[in-house]
């Protein structure tokens, strides 16, 4: 807990929320909604309620890294479960300012730092639980990000969530196919990553949207065993050894650093 300070009154919270906007996380800060007109309504609370049961209820003594933390909704939930240390990182300073304010209003001791997922190696630290939620489809290099998370910061659990489009099916595929066997690529449940050249949902930062089979396959390929899949977009994984030949080539391999 942050040392007790005089609680902010509702008018002051409203003023700060307005000044820090626009918000993506629709938080309830002392009765003030941060994004009352959110296109996904009560987000991320309503989605969180669908998979919160799949995460350990008691995080005492554990460390958590929330990558792409935005205004800190999940980081705050982790702290409320007793995590000893929670670090939220995001590439956007405006969201970090929101997160710091939200944590202050809620009296939660969480560190927030500006950092891209591509730079997690600079943290020099592993975390018991890493959250990578709603970030992958914003990346031009999604597998590189998963490889870096595996190589540098994940110690045990990875909580992964991604917007998905296309078929929800997952085909059982063979280990290998002959060069002339092209039919597997036509299966609806073949792992497929859809490239967005311009924008999707009005957002030019949406780059790659997987189908469900592709989310699962990319996680496995980066060395994350899927333990649970409590919601269609959410995967609870454990870090295991990466398949041989996999792994980030930058910056760990071929670098003098
Ligand atoms: C859709 S929001 C998801 C927020 C939150 N994790 C959630 O699940 O509600 C995506 C967040 O990822 C952040 N982001 C995008 N690219 C990033 C990068 N390269 N490194 C770290 N954060 C990034 C954005 O600034 C934004 O806050």
Image (cartoon, helix red, strand yellow):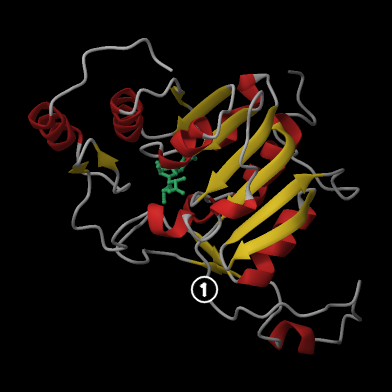
Residue 238 sits above or below residue 30 on the image? below
Which residue is pictured at 75% across the width and 29% down the height?
252
Q: Quadrant of residue 148?
A: top right
Residue 70 falls in image quadrant: top left
Above or below residue 7? Residue 49 is below
On the image, which quarter does residue 254 sit in? top right
Horizontal arrangement in the rendering, residue 49 relative to residue 130 (left or right): left
Q: Quadrant of the C terminus?
A: top right
Give coordinates of residue 153: x percent, y percent.
68, 30
Task: Report the residue at 66% width, 80% height from top.
Answer: 169
Horizontal arrangement in the rendering, residue 152 relative to residue 90 (left or right)? right
Apparent side of residue 74 relative to residue 232 in the rendered image (left or right): left
Q: Answer yes or no: is residue 122 visible.
A: yes
Residue at 88% in and 80% down: 179
For label 1, the residue is 165
Task: Indicate if the residue with disc 1 has its beta carbon within 8 Å of ligand 1.
Answer: no
Q: Residues within 10 Å of mark 1 (few under 14, many from 20)?
A: some
- Ligand 1 sits in quadrant: top left
**Residue 251 visible in this rendered orientation of the protein:** no
Q: Could you say where residue 164 lies in the image, as x and y percent from the top left?
A: 53, 68
Secondary structure of the residue carrying numbered label 1: loop
Give the camera-side residue of 253 and 200. Answer: 200
Residue 31, horizontal then vertical, whole percent = 20, 41
Q: Residue at x 40, y 36 (%)?
A: 72
Q: Is residue 159 left or right of residue 96?
A: right
């Amino acid at each position: 807990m942050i040392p007790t300070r005089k609680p902010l009154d509702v008018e002051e919270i409203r003023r700060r929320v307005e000044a820090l906007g626009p918000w993506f996380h629709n938080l309830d800060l002392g009765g003030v909604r941060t994004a009352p007109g959110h296109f996904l309504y009560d987000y991320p609370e309503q989605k969180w309620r669908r998979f919160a049961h799949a995460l350990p209820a008691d995080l005492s003594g554990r460390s958590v890294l929330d990558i792409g933390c935005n205004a800190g909704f999940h980081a705050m939930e982790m702290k409320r479960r007793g995590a000893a240390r929670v670090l939220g990182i995001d590439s956007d300073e405006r969201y970090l300012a929101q997160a710091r304010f939200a944590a202050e209003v809620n009296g939660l001791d969480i560190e927030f730092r500006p950092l891209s997922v591509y730079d997690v190696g600079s943290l020099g630290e592993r975390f018991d639980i890493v959250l990578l939620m709603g970030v992958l489809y914003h990346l031009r290099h999604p597998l590189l990000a998963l490889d870096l998370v595996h190589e540098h910061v994940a110690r045990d659990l990875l909580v992964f969530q991604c917007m998905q489009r296309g078929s929800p099916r997952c085909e059982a595929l063979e280990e290998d196919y002959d060069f002339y066997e092209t039919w597997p690529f036509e299966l609806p449940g073949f792992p497929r990553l859809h490239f967005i050249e311009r924008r999707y949902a009005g957002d030019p930062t949406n780059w790659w949207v997987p189908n469900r089979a592709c989310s699962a396959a990319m996680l496995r390929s980066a060395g994350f065993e899927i333990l649970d899949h409590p919601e269609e977009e959410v995967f609870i994984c454990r870090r295991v050894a990466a398949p041989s030949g996999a792994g980030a080539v930058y910056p760990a391999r071929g670098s003098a650093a």
